[in-house]
Image (cartoon, rainbow, N blue to C red):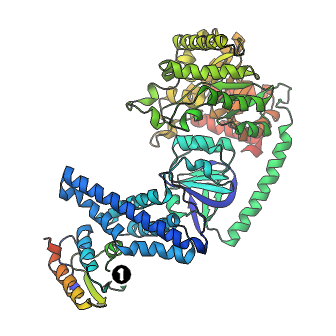
Amino acid sequence: MVAIANEQGLHARPVMRFVDMASRFQARVLVQREDRLVDGKNPMEMMLLEAVKGTMLEIRACGEDAQKAVDALAELVRSGFGES
Amino acid sequence: MEIKKGIPVSPGVAIATVVMLDAEEFQIPYERISARQVDGELERLEEGFRSSLAEVETLRDNTTVQLGPDVASIFDFHHGVLSQRQLREQVAQLIRERYYNAAFATREVMRRYQQRFLQMEDDLLRERVRDIRDIERRLLRHLCGTPGQSVLDLPETSILVAHDLTPSQTANLGQTGVLGVAMDGGGLASHTAIVVRSMGIPGVMGLKDISRAAAAGDTLILDGTKGLAIIRPDEDMLEQYRAEVLRMRALASGLIELRDKPAITQDEVPVVLMANIEFPPEARTALEKGAAGIGLYRTEFLYLRSEQEPTEMEHYEAYRSVVEALGDRPVTIRTLDLGADKYARSHAREPERNPFLGLRSIRYCLQNMDMFKTQLRAILRASALGDVQIMFPLISGLMELRQSKMALRDAMEDLEEAGIPFRRDIPIGIMVETPAAAIQIRELLREVDFVSIGTNDLIQYTVAVDRGNERVASLYTASHPAILHTLRDIIRKARKAGVPCSLCGEMAGEPMYALFLLGVGLRNYSMAPADIPEIKKVIRSTTIQRAERIAKRVLSFETDRQVNNYLRDEIRKIAPETV
């Protein structure tokens, strides 16, 4: 479980960074917001989550490097995607 | 089922399958593929994505070099969407499971995303819908091949749905067999509306988002009389409208009976009713509706339907087919009247600040003599085949008229030298549509064989209003006393000079104005073929005496509102079925 930390929330650039990173892993990545579950490697679906600053997301993965994927992605979100 | 309300621009009802004309002229074929073709289609999909991705990468690289990495980063989203497998997978699934072809499947998926994006609350995120459209267009371009003038490929039993149609596209519309047209934009006075009306098929415009709400292959009920577009109607609705169609057919056959009856008033004064057409196939419709001839043959479509200027033979072929279809009935061919709202891409060199008052129509011709004479020669050639008259539009003074006549004489010399037959004494006329021409009508009448009043432009120029500008469009009305007095003046002077005078603007096809015009001496009307039966009904239901009384009353009014109220009352009394 992580909270979106950056000002602008999950807009285009963070989405792309998230999706790029998620794609590096073999595992299937799923992101959940409340009752919506989307494919973490699909940029349009990620944007449609409409996650803004403070939104809580749950990152799940299943497959070979699932844990690594979750850790890396969670860190990315917590760090605000390297933005302010 | 979804019911959309728009602006009714052409009456009638059509029930058929939707065919979409994409904003960029991609005609998405609604063909299902067979099981065998699935693999091939999936490969095409891959190829489409690959090429699109390559294009975006090049675009991104070039932009980085020219404008820097920050600007180039807008393509990251496009790149991501195209390179991630997910989108491709969603499309592939439709191909595999529903046997959609690649283009159709892509469009489906992208449209669904667009709908979802449009519902987002966040402004910035919602803006992304443009990117998605862009990606869709790029993919479709690779999947559909080059977009062509696909209007011509439209299947016959379909209703055309589009966001907007350029004049070039409408120029080809008349040669298709579509049963109706539904558009996001446009209005009553738009060029598309005029074309659809003259085709005699239902049309609804201003539907705002029908091109998104409807999909190719959907069943659509188009009610051009009420201005409704019903997407995927349920059984009840379908039944209702099928009954309506039957009723209308019965009405139409009643009107067909009328076709063979003469257009003569109750006090035995004959009136000539002719048709305005734009495309050769409409000549047949005109005859079906009982036209006594073609009062206005608009020739612009020849210039709008392709990038190159039409050759003399192309002109001639089009004129010949109409003249031959009309037999010994008169055909008045108007020379090129490309105007402010009809400029094709090919003619927009430097956009004028005020194209409506600029180098259009006859002025453009007089400054492009080669092109002008090509058309003139073709018209002259056609004059050997039947009763052809030539008409110059937008004449604003004697000099323009004389120059045009000189150009015609030059064209005659050309044909004489080549030994090609034509009618030397071909009747030459002008459209009276500028205030200058209206004011100087006496002088002009001395130098022409006939005149035709073009009320559409005459109203715009006289009242100084752009009928296409929604903000002031309500000022555009033929009921303005200034217009009515001007018309009376022109018609009277023409009669006095013994020069045949007709009226070919939209006003001619409206029952209540027909009464007025009859009363001020007009005996020659030219209108959209579909309007002929009703006007004939009006003529047959009244006397000249009564019409003259009505006209006198109308001319005593000070405002268009008074005119409208009075004329509406009168027409209701005289020919209630036409209301």
Count residues near mark 1 (Cα–Cα under 10 Å), then give few for <14, some for 14-19, many for 20+: many
Would residue B189 be visible to someone looking at this image?
A: no
The residue carrying mark 1 is A38
Residue B221 in the image, given as x and y percentages of width and height: 65, 61
Q: Residue at x 76, y 38 (%)?
A: B284
Of the pair B396 and B486, the residue shown nearer to us: B396
Of the pair B341 and A66, the residue shown nearer to us: A66
Residue B368 in the image, given as x and y percentages of width and height: 49, 21
Vertical side of B52 occupied by B517: above or below:
above
Vertical side of B210 occupied by B290: above or below:
above
Q: Which residue is drawn at 43% across and 64% down?
A: B47
Please give the count of numbered marks on the rendered protein.
Answer: 1
Vertical side of B515 occupied by A31: above or below:
below
Task: Say what amino acid the circle numbered 1 marks.
Answer: Val
Q: Badge 1 sits on which subunit?
A: A
Of the pair B354 and B491, the residue shown nearer to us: B354
Q: Quadrant of residue B28?
A: bottom right
Vertical side of B110 occupied by B296: above or below:
above
Quadrant where the N terminus of chain B sits is bottom right
Quadrant where the C terminus of chain B sits is top right
Residue A26 in the image, given as x and y percentages of width and height: 29, 84
Would residue B483 be visible to someone looking at this image?
A: yes
Q: Which residue is drawn at 36% across and 59% down?
A: B130
Of the pair B309 and B210, the residue shown nearer to us: B309
Residue B533 in the image, given as x and y percentages of width and height: 77, 39
Q: In which quarter of the image is residue A17?
A: bottom left
Q: Quadrant of residue A63?
A: bottom left
Judged from the image, the secondary structure of the residue bearing numbered disc 1 is: strand
In this picture, residue B25 sits left or right of residue B297 = left
